[in-house]
Every structure is written in structure tokens, then in C-alpha cells.
Amino acid sequence: MRCAAAVLIVLLALCAPAAAAEWGGLIPATSTMDSVRAQYGPPTRMETQKVEGYDTTTWVYESAQAPTGMTRLVADFGLLQASGFKPGALRSFRLEPHPGVFTRDTVLAGWGRPTGVSEQGGNDSFFYEDGLVVVFDKEAWSAVSMVFTLPRPSDPAKPSR
């Protein structure tokens, strides 16, 4: 987990500013701790960790504090940019929707055709270059996880299906 977070911070630092995928008023690299708190209130719990020497923070909203239709919202703060490390900047966030909230058709209607589609561990997933990865349930009908990050160009060596 820490290694993945460290890699994400480094990769995001190399990205040029661009429009990120968004949901519910949350936009990676634009939203801040203050704007997330204003939108969703205090988190259910907070976690801090040091990644590559930087203090990062994770806010978890679950149960009654999760947004409507979600089991959980996880917001990760601390973004290394060309101008320096921004501890209060939203680096990424993950939604865990209730079954049927974000069906395959709803995702396609809301975010369009994915840049790529893959299957890992029996679950289909959509990849969007503007910073969204959607993992579907075993039936490939309902999203179980949606991760929003800064835009990430696809790997031209990997064909999409």
C-alpha cells in the first residue's frame, strides 16, 4: 500500500496540469481538505502516514457519513507537484458504491467510452485517461470501486479490448 502510494505521488508529480475526472464536487489536485470538509463534513476516521518523506493523510467516510448511495468514500491528501508538496491537496479518492448505484450503463453514460477495458481476478474494469478506474462486480454489472486520480495517459504498448 505504501509503495503504491509512493509511486502514485511520483507519477502525479510528473503529470502536467489537466482536467481530472470528478464526482460529487471532488476533483483531484483541485479540491482541498477544507473543500472536502465543507462538502461532506468531518470524516468517520483519519489516518496519517509518511510516504517518500512526506506526511500524507487519508480521510474515510463510511456508514451514515458516506455520501448517499455509497458504502464508503476514501479521500487521500498530499500531492507532490512541480511547485512543491501540497499536504492539503486531494491526491485521489475512492468510492465504494452500493450495488446497482453505478451500473455498467450508468458509468458509460456518465464518463463515456473507456480508454481501456481489462479483466483482473474475474472482475472487469474500465480505465479512463482523465483519471478514473472503475472495477465491476463478478457479473460485470455494478461498480464495486471507482478510483479518481489525476489524468494518466494509457500505455500505448497495451491494446484495449
Image (cartoon, grey):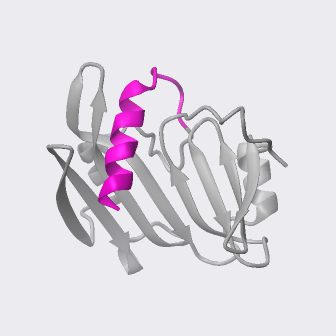
Quadrant the N terminus occupies:
bottom left
Residue 149 among magenta residues: no
Is residue 39 in view?
no
Is residue 11 in view?
yes
Which quadrant of the structure image shows residue 9?
top left
Left or right of 115, for residue 88: left
- The residue under the point 76% across, 52% down is 117
Above or below for 17 versus 99: above
Left or right of 145, for residue 94: left
Which quadrant of the structure image shows residue 138?
bottom right
Camera-side residue of 126 and 43: 126
Camera-side residue of 151 and 10: 10
- The residue under the point 54% across, 49% down is 23
Q: Position of residue 99 (x, y in %)?
A: 66, 78
How many labels, in total?
0
Above or below for 22 versus 41: above
Specify start and end residues of the magenta stretch as a single range.
1-20
Instruction: Give the main secondary structure of the magenta stretch.
Output: helix
Residue extending farthest to the right is 161
- The residue under the point 25% across, 19% down is 83
- The residue under the point 59% across, 47% down is 132
Left or right of 128, for residue 51: left
Residue extending farthest to the front is 157
Which quadrant of the structure image shows residue 49?
bottom left
Q: Position of residue 36 (x, y in %)?
A: 32, 50
Q: Position of residue 80 (x, y in %)?
A: 28, 32
Camera-side residue of 124 and 146: 124
